[in-house]
Each structure stands twice: as structure tokens, then as C-alpha cells.
């Protein structure tokens, strides 16, 4: 739903999954390291509707002996070729759906899996290593460790910046409904409903800063709502701009409400030769664009 607002700053707001555009997907590659321990359960493989998931092995698969139980009507026929197994679900599975997959190799060995779903996105490629000591498995494990280390380092850096950033402090006050303790003045407000969520959106003007606060009520009966990502970029070139984000909870349970706030400094609006307007985009947990707000640079008043 599009709504062009009257007033000095001509803000435009789009909200609603029914008109949302899918975010460009990123490849999701995961490594599984098998164990010989008898108590270990079958490894899980996560799939998403209409998205191919390929399992890659170090040995050749037996096309006749490899079986996915209950795939009829829910998956395209599994494709087994060489060292790969390809799965394409016709629609999304629920986390409680658990389909047994038995992969058999030409040497007679077998490996069981459980095909299911989880919140967020599924696997696009799963590399399976039966022996952790092979060179490929060691290299993959090292890569996994480096990715985890980099993620932890970035998270720690972000937390340190948040502890000292004035903009994050202002966003925290807005999220806690302590607006009177900030320099912000409410400029415009909307209430929007799309059947899945009810959202109250407030746009604030401040001294050399602008802010947006979202109060979201999850009207779904079963699914949680969560924010996967927020992006702030220029309307002219799409260049990413910095901002501060605070949320009062990581996810919103069915029937519950939550808040998050975004604060942008005036410097984010600066461009060559003057100032530019910004667009704030929201992507919910499943990757759909939940909405966006166009921010006029005049919101960040002196």
C-alpha cells in the first residue's frame, strides 16, 4: 500500500508484505561433519519452498538406494547424480515437518538426514564430510572457524560502538518511550494494517538528526515477527549511509507488540554539492521487504 503524505517534507511510506519485493537472496552454504558415535542423531537439512538445496558428498551416491520418504506432492522428484543430491520443495515446510532422507553410496555406506525447515532461509548447499581428518574437511572447518571469529569480532565492535554512540543512546530512549528526554519533535504519524501486522510509525525531526520509531503488533496466530535487516541509503545513488538502530526485543510473539527506532545524523544526508534525501528500508525475518520510509533531509534541522 502506497500513501503519499501532504506537508512540508512529502514523506512516502510503503508497508505490507502483500506488495513487498523479495530481497535479493544470498547463497547459504553450510558444512556438516559426521560422527561415528552411535548416539548421534541424523543431521538436519533445512529447505525453503521453490529454492533448490544441494547436498554434496566426497563419495559417489547410489541413485537407486538414496530415498527421501514422503516427497511425493511436496518436492520435485529428488535428483541424484555423481556426488550430489538435489532437493526442490514445491512449497515451504513447517518446522514440525520432518522427512527422512537416506543417502546411500556406491560402496554400500549409508548416511541418514532429516529434511525440515527453520525460521529464516534454508540451505542452498550442504557440504557433508564423513571424515573430519580429510584435507577438504580440515579446510572447511578452518573456514567455518574464521567466519565465526569474524562475526564475533564484528559483533563486539558493534557493541562497543553502541555503548559510546550518542545516536544509539537516543534510539534507546525512543524505544523506551522516553521521547521527552530527547531533542526530537514528532513530525508525522501513521497507523497501518495489512492483516499480518499493525504498525504505528512516527517520524521525528531533531537538531541535526532525524528519527523513525516503529511500534509493531504481530497479528499472526502462530508465527513470530522479527526484523532481519534495516537499510538506509540515498535516493539518488543507493549509497548506504550509517544509522543507529535499537530494538526492545529480538522477535515479537503472536499477539504481542514490540518497538524499534532508527536515528540518522545530519551527516548521513550530506552529498556532493549539498544534501540528499534518504530511504529507510525494512526487511522482515523471511527476507521480504516489509516497508520503506522516504526521509527528507530537512528533517535533520539545525
Image (spheres, helix red, strand yellow):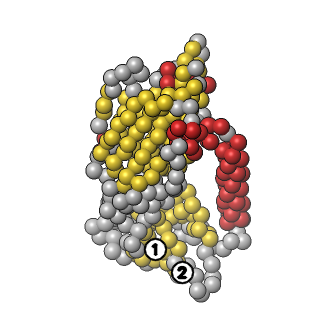
Give 127 or 281, whichever is nearer the viewer.
Answer: 281
Residue 165 in sight from this viewpoint: yes
Residue visible at 63% across and 84% down? 37
Dividing the image into 4 quarters, which one contains the N terminus? top left
Element at badge 1? strand
| Residue carrying label 1 | 114
Residue 43, percent from left and from top: 53, 74
Residue 10, percent from left and from top: 38, 22
Element at badge 2? loop
Q: Pointer 2: residues within 10 angstroms few (<14), some, or many (20+)?
A: few
Q: Pointer 1: residues within 10 angstroms few (<14), some, or many (20+)?
A: some
Residue 105, percent from left and from top: 52, 75
Q: Is residue 255 above or below residue 181?
A: below
Q: CA distance from mark 1 to mark 2?
A: 9 Å
Would you say the residues marked 1 and 2 are in contact, meaning their CB atoms lie under 8 Å apart?
Answer: yes
Horizontal side of 153 relative to 223 (left or right) equals right
Horizontal side of 114 relative to 239 (left or right) equals left
Give 155 or 254, whichever is nearer the viewer.
Answer: 254
Q: Is residue 220 above or below residue 166?
A: below
Give 160 or 79, whichever is nearer the viewer.
Answer: 160
Q: Is residue 293 above or below residue 146?
A: above
Horizontal side of 224 relative to 220 (left or right) equals right
Q: Residue furthest top?
A: 273
Q: Earlier in the sequence, mark 1 or mark 2?
A: 2
Tally of marks: 2
Residue 60, percent from left and from top: 54, 70
Identify the image quadrant of residue 49. Answer: bottom left
Q: Residue furthest bottom?
A: 38
| Residue carrying label 2 | 41
Residue visible at 43% across and 29% down? 187
Q: Residue furthest front?
A: 180
Give 241 or 75, whichever is nearer the viewer.
Answer: 241
Amino acid at each position: 500500500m502506497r500513501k503519499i503524505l501532504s506537508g512540508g517534507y512529502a514523506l512516502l511510506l510503503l508497508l505490507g508484505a502483500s506488495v513487498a519485493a523479495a530481497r535479493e537472496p544470498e547463497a547459504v552454504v553450510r558444512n556438516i561433519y559426521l560422527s561415528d558415535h552411535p548416539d548421534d542423531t541424523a543431521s538436519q537439512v533445512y529447505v525453503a519452498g521453490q529454492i533448490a538445496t544441494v547436498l554434496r558428498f566426497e563419495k559417489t551416491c547410489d541413485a537407486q538406494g538414496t530415498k527421501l520418504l514422503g516427497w511425493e506432492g511436496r518436492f520435485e522428484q529428488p535428483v541424484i547424480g555423481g556426488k550430489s543430491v538435489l532437493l526442490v520443495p514445491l512449497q515451504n515446510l513447517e518446522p514440525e515437518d520432518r522427512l527422512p532422507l537416506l543417502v546411500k553410496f556406491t560402496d554400500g555406506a549409508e548416511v541418514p538426514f532429516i529434511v525440515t525447515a527453520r525460521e529464516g532461509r534454508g540451505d542452498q548447499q550442504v557440504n557433508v564430510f564423513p571424515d573430519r581428518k580429510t584435507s577438504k574437511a580440515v579446510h572447511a572447518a578452518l573456514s567455518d572457524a574464521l567466519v565465526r571469529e569474524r562475526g564475533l569480532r564484528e559483533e563486539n565492535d558493534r557493541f562497543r560502538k553502541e555503548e559510546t554512540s550518542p545516536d544509539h543512546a537516543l534510539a534507546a530512549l525512543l524505544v523506551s518511550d522516553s521521547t521527552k528526554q530527547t531533542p526530537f519533535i514528532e513530525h508525522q504519524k501513521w497507523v497501518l494494517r495489512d492483516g499480518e501486522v499493525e504498525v504505528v510509525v512516527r517520524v521525528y525531526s531533531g537538531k541535526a538528526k532525524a528519527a523513525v520509531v516503529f511500534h509493531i503488533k504481530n497479528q499472526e496466530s502462530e508465527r513470530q515477527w522479527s526484523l532481519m535487516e534495516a537499510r538506509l541509503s540515498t535516493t539518488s545513488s543507493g549509497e548506504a549511509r550509517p544509522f543507529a538502530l535499537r530494538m526492545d526485543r529480538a522477535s515479537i510473539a503472536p499477539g504481542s507488540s514490540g518497538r524499534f527506532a532508527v536515528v540518522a545524523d545530519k551527516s548521513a544526508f550530506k552529498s556532493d554539492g549539498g544534501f540528499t534525501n534518504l530511504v529507510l528500508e525494512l526487511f522482515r525475518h523471511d527476507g521480504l521487504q516489509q516497508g520503506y520510509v522516504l526521509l527528507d533531509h530537512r528533517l535533520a534541522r539545525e
